[in-house]
Amino acid sequence: MFDGVAARYDLTNTVLSFGQDRSWRRATRAALGLLPGERVLDVGAGTGVSTQELARSGAYAVGADLSQGMLHAGRRVRPEVPLLAGDALRLPFADASFDAVTISFALRNVNDPDAALRELARVTRPGGRLVVCEFSTPVHPAFRTVYLSYLMRSLPTVARTVSSNPDAYVYLAESIRAWPDQAALAARVGAAGWGRVAWRNLTGGVVALHRAVRV
Ligand SMILES: C[S@@+](CC[C@H](N)C(=O)[O-])C[C@H]1O[C@@H](n2cnc3c(N)ncnc32)[C@H](O)[C@@H]1O
């Protein structure tokens, strides 16, 4: 599915999120508290748009993704970003290789998110940091109603005019609706080898950043 949306992935994101995706990526970088020279892994990096933002910290940022189509599209527009083929469930890295790991808008797409959270813990050094950036549940009930209506009705229609594979955006809407809310995801992060789990809502909870420390 991601091979099919790769060509116009970056543009479609920006259109469907009204440009908010850029601020969500900046907030993810800030939440990781990266220092120059640290090593950070971006899992489900896709075209490397999230990885590129991390590198602005001065850390060494590497992206890994399962979709060759997304990786090819990313390497074409961001040749300076290191992007590797890799499965979130079997990462091609040794134990404790990274100071920080992150996954943006990808944990929801992995077949077994709990196993992926454990695998992220495996490649992170003790005391290293995790940030999960993912769609979540808007906090205010009235806003939640408007948002869900946008998600289920308008988003697939807009995607039809922008994306190279509009059906993928029907999946996007359905997968967001089925995803656990902030507290439920925090419990799953805590059960996967991570401590000091906390979250912060962005755009009223449309997106949540979950952060944690490797125990
Ligand atoms: C919505 S994109 C997110 C891309 C990028 N992180 C961003 O913020 O725009 C989700 C990505 O997760 C990848 N993905 C899904 N399952 C995966 C897995 N098991 N291992 C690695 N990547 C995976 C897909 O190939 C896709 O590129």
Image (cartoon, rainbow, N blue to C red):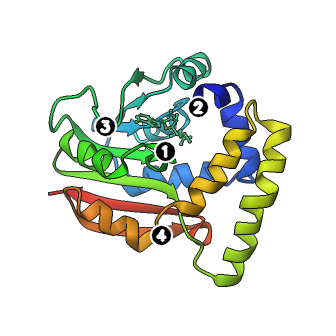
First along the sequence among labels 1 and 3: 3
Badge 2 vs badge 1, beta-carbon distance below 8 Å: yes
- Give the CA distance from mark 1 to mark 3: 12 Å
Q: Secondary structure at mark 4?
A: loop
Q: Which residue is mark 4?
A: 181
Q: Amino acid at mark 1?
A: Asn
Q: Which residue is mark 2?
A: 2
- Give the CA distance from mark 4 to mark 2: 24 Å
Q: Which residue is mark 3?
A: 89
Residue 33 in view here? no
Front-lying residue, 5 or 125: 5
Q: Secondary structure at mark 3?
A: loop
How crowded pointer 4 is (Cα within 10 Å; few <14, some 14-19, many 20+) is rated as some
Residue 195: x and y, percent? 21, 64
Q: Secondary structure at mark 1?
A: helix
Q: Amino acid at mark 3?
A: Leu
Q: Which residue is mark 1?
A: 109
